[in-house]
Amino acid sequence: MAQPRHEFEHFPVSKYRKILVVEDDERVRDSLVELLREWGHNVDTAVNGTEAWNKIVASDPAVVLSDLQMPGLSGLELLKRTREFNQSISFIMLTGHGTIPHAVEATRLGAFDFLEKGTDPSHLQVALRNCLHRHESERQLQIAHRKLRDLGALGRLVGHSKKMRQLMSLINLVAPSAAPVLITGESGTGKEVVARTIHELSPYRSNSFVAVNCAAIPESLIESELFGHEKGAFTGAFESRMGCFELAQGGTLLLDEIGEMPLTAQAKLLRVLEDSKVRRLGARNETAVSARVLASTNREPEEAVRSGSLRSDLYYRLNVVHISMPPLREHLEDLELLASSLVEELCQKHERRTKAIDPEALRLMHEYPWPGNVRELRNVLERAVVTCAGDTITAENLSNPVRGLAAAVGI
């Protein structure tokens, strides 16, 4: 029986690419096609390996659902030839003679999964869903690589400078993993943007991204915010509540300003990171959690450890990969590209016509030291977009600090 279509809500049906069913048994082939179309997929068929190979070359399907044993070009031979042609095409192998040697060989050649004919349709649906998740993640990563190469952009990060390209390359390397990442840098440099970019390029992208500002939560509430609580656990706990770890289940959790977290909460956080289990306040039992943890701070983490505000064992646990965000003043060669990108985004936000930035305004922006970094640049440009009556942002549209510095030094 076909499973509910909502199983595939993470990827809308309109985004699916073709699934090619390769099966010489007409009855089995028609049954699979009916099932897949009932699940909302775009399906094509082939009656043998040779026909399938021609269609693979011509139409580049996302997934091939293939019989293993066929006359002429077998399923294993089709898999091997396809993997040499295009490794982004995923294979799910089907057989009525499921043996360990066949499974091992298919896996060695790169098959995503191996199922016996007549298996419960839910098993096929799970395998197909996982296959499409991987395909979509790989497609997004390829898009990101192209944007990085052609436009100097990675997600919402923009820049052609050496520092930004090194940063983007590191993000590309770490995003597909589950490794914890510690992001440091001055306020306004874009630490949360980096965290969101890592999430969007990771296998966790179809699940939640949860950010919690450890500096903004009162010490009395930090444990409840992180780990959740049961009804009646403390005064005012009128109902049970999930914490951030449970809310980020299967996704990514960003612990912003980790150095401001109370030491007692840091000790409990370390245990959660080590055991992958949380116990809500007032609960007897622990709950297993699986979320990738990222952390950020605008302080020097080594100094925070020396001063005793950040536990050394927690620091080492989080600092598997360290990403240091450069202040805007250290990569001003990116300012024009970054400003253009922000203006385009802000024009859409405020429903204004796309605006250019005139050379005099750009010159003033290059002379300004930007103590508030990219966040300050965004605020300045948002004011400019809102106050600009024409199609071009001029020096008069810039805020006083930017124009004031220029006047003070006589430029």
Image (cartoon, grey):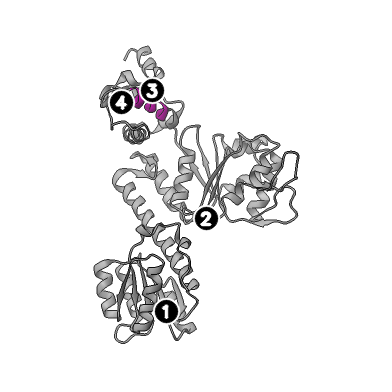
Q: Residues within 10 Å of mark 1 (few under 14, many from 20)?
A: many
Between the residue at mark 3 and the residue at mark 2, the CA separation in whole angstroms equals 39 Å
Q: Circle 4 sits on which residue?
A: 362
Residue drawn 75% across the image and 48% down it: 282
Q: Is residue 231 magenta?
A: no
Q: CA distance from mark 4 to mark 2?
A: 40 Å
Q: Would residue 99 appear left or right of 259 to someone viewing this image?
A: left
- 43 and 38: which one is in front? 38
Q: Which residue is mark 1?
A: 94
Q: Is residue 391 left or right of residue 66?
A: left
**Which residue matches tag 3?**
368
Q: The disc labelled 2 sits on which kind of residue?
A: Ala
- Classify residue 75 by image quadrant: bottom left
Mark 4 crowdedness (10 Å alpha carbons): few <14, some 14-19, many ≥20:
some
CA separation in Å, label 4 and label 3: 10 Å
Residue range corresponding to the magenta coloring: 377-387
Pinpoint residue 369: horizontal percent, then vertical percent.
41, 24
The disc label shown at residue 178, or none: 2
Q: CA distance from mark 1 to mark 2?
A: 31 Å
Judged from the image, the secondary structure of the residue bearing numbered disc 3 is: loop
Q: Position of residue 104 (x, y in %)?
A: 46, 79
At label 3, counting other C-alpha atoms closer than 10 Å, the crowd grade (few under 14, some 14-19, many 20 or more) is some
**Closest to the observer, 50 or 264:** 50
Between label 4 and label 1, give the one nearer the viewer: 1
Can residue 76 be seen here?
no
Q: Earlier in the sequence, mark 3 or mark 1?
A: 1
Asked whether the viewer can see residue 265, the reply is: yes
Query: Which residue appears at 43% of the width and 61% of the height?
Result: 133
Marked residue nearer the N-terminal end (4 or 1) = 1
